[in-house]
Amino acid sequence: MKRISWPTIVVIALLVLFPLVVQSDYYRHIFILSLMWVVIGSAWNLLAGYTGQVSFGHAIFFGTGAYTAGLGVTKLGISAWWGMLLGGPVALLVGLIIGWICFRLRGPYFALATIAIGEIFRLVAIDWRSMTDGMDGILIIQSFRSKLPYYYLALALAIACVFAVYLVLRSKWGYYFVAIREDQDVAETIGISSFRYKSLSLMISSYFTGMAGAFYMNYMAFIDPHVVFSLHDISIMAILVAIIGGVGTLWGPAVGAFIMVWLQEIFRSAFFGLLPQWVSEAHVLVFGLLVIFVIRYLANGIVGDWSKITGDWFKKKQLSYSSSGN
Amino acid sequence: MNFFETQHLTKRFGGLIAVNDLSFGVEEGEIFGLIGPNGSGKTTVFNLITGSYPITSGTIQFKNHRLNGLATWKICKLGVGRTFQVVKPLRRMTVLDNVIASAFNHTGSLHEARDKALQALEFCDLIEKKDYPAKGLTIGDRKRLEITRALATEPALLLLDETMAGLTPQEQTEGVELIRKIRDAGITIIIVEHIMHVIMSICDRILCINYGQEIASGLPAEVANNQDVIEAYLGKD
Ligand SMILES: Nc1ncnc2c1ncn2[C@@H]1O[C@H](COP(=O)(O)OP(=O)(O)OP(=O)(O)O)[C@@H](O)[C@H]1O
Ligand SMILES: [Mg+2]
């Protein structure tokens, strides 16, 4: 196996040191959310970016993980931390069932089905009050006052998820996933059960997304159906994270996560209170414009088109050189 | 029992009968030619063999397996490889990765799959282009990649669908050599080809079909001189 490159080690070292240097709870909070989104974005990317099965419903797995942790507290009286253990497997099971239903069909059925199933999960969580307490949500008592334990847990999850994707890509599964993305007919004729391997990809993806959901329950200590089963704040956000960073690249979603969480925060706070409050309402619009920009100019995302970004910059410099020479 | 055999193979697309009551056998180690005018059903026969289309009626048997109703990937696992007439490179993968993906057919190890893929690329003389993105290949190399990818699945029976179409005479000569080399490696071949001198020179036996039905079969010389075959190709006056 190839050794892990030094930029990776540097980035991880910086992330380990970050909360020790930066004492502000606010910045630690933003980083914790970013790391959580690294997990979700990478998980989404494995399924959509590498296997070609676009999901508009990753909130299904996020919410399932979160509610597994939350219901453990309210219904079973166990610690929400059990969710970290159970949230992944329960979400994986949901993924398995969805795949079993949708992956026999070709084309956009999977994408459409994920939207529909996502809404069903949200509505069930709202209306099944005896189970979920509906829109009252689930409130638990946070285990730690300090952000540090959460930070390092989120960091460990993010590293585990990116590393898992890395390992998968260097294995038979990874080759099979990409072959299916490129051409399902070819995949079948070279001995790949597209149904089986699409399901496997979805299971890995839903597992990590469920873990992220369980983490969210523990960290935020409050969830309700609109938050964790949200179409645009979770499902669409997962897509944006991957698109901005680079679909089908290992590091794209990690980069995209930090950018998107910061952008969201900048808008939520209306540029840290510098602009009038209505600006915070505009974030959906700005995200939309951002996606259009990225798709138009950086179709492979910031990571996928990095050479283009730096190359263009370099070329412009050379041009200005030559024009000044004339 | 033949190595490979179809019995009364039939395929309907709605009202159209693309393959009509076709029975033929292929012996182990031979190069078997399947010819016929455009739209006569050759590619459809391949699609039936590989399970890409469901069979309307009839049977297909390979070694001691009945292929009817099996999934395409299972048929590949049993040892049937195929190329596509309209080439289908896995575009955003390198040539090597294209072949590695198929070399995983009988192994789970990347190391082994890579070795097998390199061997197949060497065998098909595509090794120099292994790091090219597959979408950047010339048509000749794309056809070669189709063959390499099929070989990397380690088939006992290989279905070649017009792998010479669109090639230069020089490339065609190389293609004929490659196909002989594949046969000499112990792989049985069914080949669909329009280029007559190619088909006549390499096939042990030939089946000619029109409108999905057999019109002649036998040794190349017999088929070439058959009146129905000549009419089917040139059209009746
Ligand atoms: N998926 C399909 N649906 C409907 N009709 C089809 C389909 N595939 C093939 N056909 C029809 O079946 C007939 C046989 O087609 P096929 O592609 O097998 O011919 P062929 O012998 O391979 O021709 P060519 O030499 O041009 O490649 C044609 O009339 C074609 O239009
Ligand atoms: Mg054809």
Image (cartoon, rainbow, N blue to C red):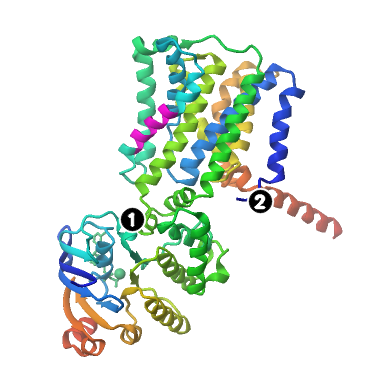
Q: Residue at x 32, y 84 (%)?
A: B196
The numbered disc on residue A128 is none
Q: Which residue is mark 2?
A: A308
Q: Is residue A324 visible?
A: yes
Q: Which residues are magenta?
A: A89-99
Q: Residue at x 46, y 81 (%)?
A: B174
Decide: is B20 above or below B71.
Answer: below
A212 within the magenta span: no
Chain designation of label 2: A
Q: Nearer the viewer, residue A291 or B74?
A: B74
Decide: is A212 above or below A71.
Answer: below
Q: Nearer the viewer, residue A23 or B37?
A: A23
Chain designation of label 1: B
Decide: is B92 above or below A28.
Answer: below
Three-letter code, disc 1: Trp
| Horizontal side of residue A62 vs B201, given as left or right | right
A91 within the magenta span: yes
Q: Which residue is mark 1?
A: B73
Q: Is residue A107 visible?
A: no
Residue A208: image location, x then y, percent: 49, 32
Q: Are marks 1 and 2 in contact (CB under 8 Å)?
A: no
Query: What main secondary structure does the magenta stretch of the protein show?
Result: helix
